[in-house]
Amino acid sequence: MKGLARFVSIFARWLLRREWSQLRDRLSRAYQSHVDNHASCPSVLAQQLLISGEDHRFFSHGGIDPIAVCRALWRGVVLRRPEGASTIEMQVIRVVSARYERTATRKIREMALATLVTLEIPKDALPAVYLRLGYFGWRMNGFDAACQHLALRPDSLTPIETARLVARLKYPQPRDVSPHRWRKIDARAHHLLRLHLRHQHDHTYIGLVTGPAYASV
């Protein structure tokens, strides 16, 4: 799968060189900020839950997941059930570029630029960097801001608290939270924890430092 990304990256660096030049500086600053504040890095569990929920083939691709792309095309075109195929690299590009328009052109550019992300941010640091940048909801831009807003201590989060935080990346918390949104966040959190229990026994997290497993949810 990484061969496709390397092929795309050659053209991306040439065709999107102006946009990449701007994004490269922002990515570099984001990574440097992560390195400078490594003591407050999101936990290994948070990173693992992110990978499980958003991009479980993260360590086997180079920014584009061909399997997810093919599945999304099949479900969108044939079954008329739109589905995303975003990798963590693509989500980093989306946040850093602040481009969220729902167009095919934006998606294609995002995929191409995603193949260049690891030129500035090492693969094993990307989950933590994305958690630091991601949008968790109203007044919650980044992991630390989310913890502060929710009155949580980043260094002493329980598994379910961590999962509910990561769940907000899919279901951002609005200013006024309805019971329906709370249920979606909670259901997503428990789903992430179930995925984590399963993924601990394969190579999903092979590029991350593994932490102690928790016994129950």
Image (cartoon, rainbow, N blue to C red):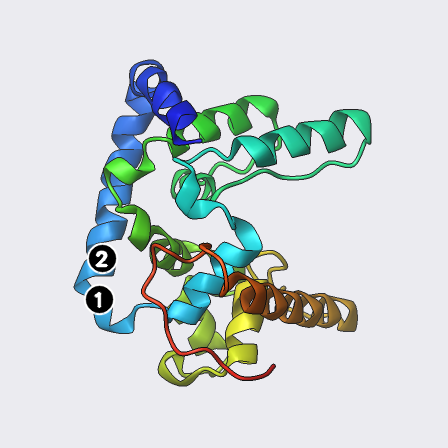
Judged from this view, the residue extending furthest toward the right is 79
Residue nearest the viewer, comparing 179 with 39 = 39
Q: Bin the neighbour count of mark 1 within 10 Å (Cα to Cα): few under 14, some 14-19, many 20 and up.
A: few
| The image quarter in which residue 128 lies | bottom left
Q: Quadrant of the C terminus?
A: bottom right
Q: Tell me where residue 113 appears, x and y as whole percent.
A: 39, 29
Which residue was labeled with disc 2?
Answer: 33
Q: Is residue 3 above or below residue 171?
A: above
Q: Are marks 2 and 1 in contact (CB under 8 Å)?
A: yes
| Dot 2 amino acid type | Ser
Which residue was labeled with disc 1?
Answer: 37
- The residue at the point 57 percent across, 78 percent down is 160
- For label 1, the SS is loop
Q: Quadrant of the N terminus?
A: top left
Q: Tell me where residue 135 appears, x and y as whole percent.
A: 49, 57
- The residue at the point 48 percent across, 55 percent down is 51
- The residue at the point 42 percent across, 58 percent down is 205
Left or right: 187, with 127 as reference point: right
Q: Bin the neighbour count of mark 2 within 10 Å (Cα to Cα): few under 14, some 14-19, many 20 and up.
A: few
State the CA–CA distance, disc 2 to disc 1.
6 Å
Q: Tell me where residue 211 appears, x and y as whole percent.
A: 37, 74
| The image quarter in which residue 114 lies | top left
